[in-house]
Amino acid sequence: MENFQVGCLLLGTALLAWQTRAVKQAHERVFFAALALFFATFALREFDVRKGDWPPLIVSVLDGTIRNLWLGALWLIIGCFAYRNRANVLIFGWKWLRSPPGRILLAAGLFWVVAATVDKANVFGTRRRNLLTEELLEVDAALLMAFSAIISLLRPRNTLAEDAASQWTPAEAPDHPT
Protein backbone atom coordinates (compact mmCIF):
# COMPACT_ATOMS: atom_id res chain seq x y z
CA MET A 1 0.00 0.00 0.00
CA GLU A 2 2.85 2.38 0.74
CA ASN A 3 4.16 2.07 -2.83
CA PHE A 4 0.74 3.14 -4.13
CA GLN A 5 0.80 6.11 -1.76
CA VAL A 6 4.27 7.07 -3.00
CA GLY A 7 3.06 6.80 -6.59
CA CYS A 8 0.09 9.10 -5.91
CA LEU A 9 2.30 11.58 -4.08
CA LEU A 10 4.93 11.57 -6.84
CA LEU A 11 2.19 12.10 -9.44
CA GLY A 12 0.97 15.09 -7.43
CA THR A 13 4.53 16.39 -7.08
CA ALA A 14 5.10 16.15 -10.83
CA LEU A 15 1.80 17.86 -11.68
CA LEU A 16 2.46 20.70 -9.24
CA ALA A 17 6.02 21.08 -10.54
CA TRP A 18 4.54 21.31 -14.05
CA GLN A 19 2.10 23.93 -12.80
CA THR A 20 5.00 25.84 -11.23
CA ARG A 21 6.52 26.16 -14.69
CA ALA A 22 3.19 27.04 -16.33
CA VAL A 23 2.15 29.99 -14.15
CA LYS A 24 3.38 33.49 -14.94
CA GLN A 25 3.33 35.32 -11.61
CA ALA A 26 6.29 34.93 -9.22
CA HIS A 27 4.09 34.44 -6.15
CA GLU A 28 2.15 31.66 -7.92
CA ARG A 29 5.41 29.95 -8.89
CA VAL A 30 6.59 30.10 -5.29
CA PHE A 31 3.27 28.79 -4.01
CA PHE A 32 3.12 25.83 -6.40
CA ALA A 33 6.81 25.04 -5.90
CA ALA A 34 6.21 24.92 -2.14
CA LEU A 35 3.16 22.73 -2.69
CA ALA A 36 5.20 20.38 -4.91
CA LEU A 37 7.89 20.19 -2.23
CA PHE A 38 5.19 19.50 0.36
CA PHE A 39 3.96 16.55 -1.72
CA ALA A 40 7.55 15.33 -2.26
CA THR A 41 8.17 15.50 1.48
CA PHE A 42 5.19 13.24 2.09
CA ALA A 43 6.42 10.88 -0.65
CA LEU A 44 9.84 10.65 1.01
CA ARG A 45 8.16 10.04 4.36
CA GLU A 46 6.18 7.12 2.93
CA PHE A 47 9.02 5.65 0.84
CA ASP A 48 10.87 3.19 3.08
CA VAL A 49 14.30 2.39 1.66
CA ARG A 50 15.26 0.36 4.74
CA LYS A 51 12.95 -2.53 3.73
CA GLY A 52 14.39 -2.97 0.25
CA ASP A 53 17.74 -4.13 -1.05
CA TRP A 54 18.96 -0.64 -1.87
CA PRO A 55 22.61 0.42 -2.21
CA PRO A 56 23.94 2.16 0.92
CA LEU A 57 24.34 5.48 -0.91
CA ILE A 58 20.62 5.52 -1.85
CA VAL A 59 19.65 4.61 1.71
CA SER A 60 21.79 7.38 3.18
CA VAL A 61 20.44 10.01 0.74
CA LEU A 62 16.76 9.02 1.11
CA ASP A 63 16.67 8.23 4.83
CA GLY A 64 17.99 9.75 8.02
CA THR A 65 20.14 12.78 8.68
CA ILE A 66 21.39 13.37 5.13
CA ARG A 67 17.82 13.33 3.76
CA ASN A 68 16.72 15.70 6.50
CA LEU A 69 19.57 18.10 5.68
CA TRP A 70 18.94 18.34 1.93
CA LEU A 71 15.17 18.43 2.39
CA GLY A 72 15.55 21.14 5.05
CA ALA A 73 17.78 23.11 2.67
CA LEU A 74 15.10 22.94 -0.05
CA TRP A 75 12.47 24.16 2.44
CA LEU A 76 14.79 26.98 3.47
CA ILE A 77 15.23 28.06 -0.18
CA ILE A 78 11.45 27.96 -0.78
CA GLY A 79 10.99 29.88 2.48
CA CYS A 80 13.35 32.63 1.28
CA PHE A 81 11.44 33.01 -1.99
CA ALA A 82 8.13 32.94 -0.12
CA TYR A 83 9.39 35.64 2.24
CA ARG A 84 10.34 37.87 -0.69
CA ASN A 85 6.80 37.53 -2.09
CA ARG A 86 5.03 37.00 1.24
CA ALA A 87 2.04 39.31 0.77
CA ASN A 88 1.04 37.94 -2.63
CA VAL A 89 1.87 34.34 -1.67
CA LEU A 90 -0.40 34.58 1.38
CA ILE A 91 -3.26 36.15 -0.57
CA PHE A 92 -2.96 33.61 -3.36
CA GLY A 93 -2.55 30.73 -0.90
CA TRP A 94 -5.75 31.60 0.98
CA LYS A 95 -7.62 31.94 -2.31
CA TRP A 96 -6.28 28.57 -3.48
CA LEU A 97 -7.26 26.88 -0.19
CA ARG A 98 -10.85 28.09 -0.68
CA SER A 99 -10.94 26.65 -4.21
CA PRO A 100 -11.98 23.02 -4.86
CA PRO A 101 -8.38 21.73 -5.11
CA GLY A 102 -7.53 23.45 -1.82
CA ARG A 103 -10.56 22.00 -0.07
CA ILE A 104 -9.67 18.54 -1.32
CA LEU A 105 -6.12 18.99 -0.03
CA LEU A 106 -7.51 20.03 3.37
CA ALA A 107 -9.66 16.88 3.40
CA ALA A 108 -6.51 14.86 2.63
CA GLY A 109 -4.85 16.53 5.60
CA LEU A 110 -7.70 15.39 7.80
CA PHE A 111 -7.15 11.81 6.61
CA TRP A 112 -3.42 12.08 7.44
CA VAL A 113 -4.23 13.34 10.95
CA VAL A 114 -6.75 10.55 11.58
CA ALA A 115 -4.25 7.98 10.24
CA ALA A 116 -1.56 9.26 12.62
CA THR A 117 -4.05 9.10 15.50
CA VAL A 118 -4.94 5.50 14.64
CA ASP A 119 -1.22 4.67 14.43
CA LYS A 120 -0.53 6.03 17.91
CA ALA A 121 -3.69 4.85 19.69
CA ASN A 122 -5.00 1.32 20.03
CA VAL A 123 -8.36 2.19 18.48
CA PHE A 124 -9.33 -1.16 16.93
CA GLY A 125 -8.08 -3.62 19.52
CA THR A 126 -5.28 -5.33 17.60
CA ARG A 127 -2.13 -3.99 16.04
CA ARG A 128 -3.00 -5.61 12.67
CA ARG A 129 -6.39 -3.88 12.49
CA ASN A 130 -4.86 -0.56 13.49
CA LEU A 131 -2.15 -0.95 10.84
CA LEU A 132 -4.68 -1.84 8.12
CA THR A 133 -6.91 1.10 9.04
CA GLU A 134 -3.95 3.48 9.17
CA GLU A 135 -2.71 2.36 5.75
CA LEU A 136 -6.18 2.61 4.21
CA LEU A 137 -6.57 6.13 5.57
CA GLU A 138 -3.15 7.06 4.21
CA VAL A 139 -4.04 5.63 0.78
CA ASP A 140 -7.20 7.75 0.80
CA ALA A 141 -5.17 10.81 1.79
CA ALA A 142 -2.60 10.22 -0.97
CA LEU A 143 -5.37 9.73 -3.54
CA LEU A 144 -7.02 12.96 -2.46
CA MET A 145 -3.69 14.78 -2.71
CA ALA A 146 -3.14 13.50 -6.25
CA PHE A 147 -6.73 14.43 -7.15
CA SER A 148 -6.15 17.92 -5.73
CA ALA A 149 -3.05 18.35 -7.91
CA ILE A 150 -4.93 17.14 -11.00
CA ILE A 151 -7.82 19.53 -10.41
CA SER A 152 -5.44 22.39 -9.64
CA LEU A 153 -3.65 21.84 -12.94
CA LEU A 154 -6.88 21.61 -14.91
CA ARG A 155 -8.53 24.71 -13.41
CA PRO A 156 -7.72 27.97 -15.18
CA ARG A 157 -6.01 30.56 -13.00
CA ASN A 158 -8.77 33.14 -13.33
CA THR A 159 -11.27 30.82 -11.62
CA LEU A 160 -9.36 31.21 -8.36
CA ALA A 161 -10.26 34.87 -8.23
CA GLU A 162 -13.88 34.05 -9.07
CA ASP A 163 -13.99 31.35 -6.35
CA ALA A 164 -12.68 33.79 -3.77
CA ALA A 165 -15.04 36.53 -4.90
CA SER A 166 -18.01 34.18 -4.64
CA GLN A 167 -17.34 33.58 -0.94
CA TRP A 168 -19.74 35.44 1.34
CA THR A 169 -18.42 38.29 3.36
CA PRO A 170 -19.74 38.68 6.91
CA ALA A 171 -21.94 41.62 5.84
CA GLU A 172 -23.64 39.47 3.18
CA ALA A 173 -24.44 36.55 5.49
CA PRO A 174 -28.21 36.04 5.89
CA ASP A 175 -28.11 35.98 9.69
CA HIS A 176 -26.17 39.23 9.97
CA PRO A 177 -28.28 42.17 11.23
CA THR A 178 -28.24 45.10 8.82
Image (cartoon, grey):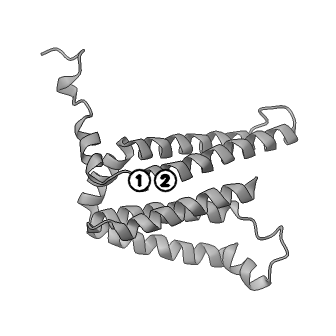
- Who is closer to the viewer here, 69 or 21? 21
Q: Quadrant of residue 25?
A: bottom left
Above or below for 177 versus 149: above
User: Residue 154, which numbered label?
Assistant: 1
Q: Is residue 19 left or right of residue 5?
A: left
Picture coordinates of residue 122, whole percent (x, y): 79, 36
Asked if the residue under mark 2 is in contact with the one under mark 1, i.e. CB atoms within 8 Å, the reply is yes
Picture coordinates of residue 145, whole percent (x, y): 54, 50
Above or below for 56 versus 42: below
Q: Say which element carries label 2.
A: helix
Circle 1 residues within 10 Å: few <14, some 14–19, many ≥20: few
Q: Say which element carries label 1.
A: helix
**Which residue is painted at 83% across and 71% down in the image?**
52
Picture coordinates of residue 98, whole percent (x, y): 36, 41
User: Residue 150, which numbered label?
Assistant: 2
Looking at numbered disc 1 in the image, what kind of residue is underneath it?
A: Leu
- Who is closer to the viewer here, 128 or 8? 8
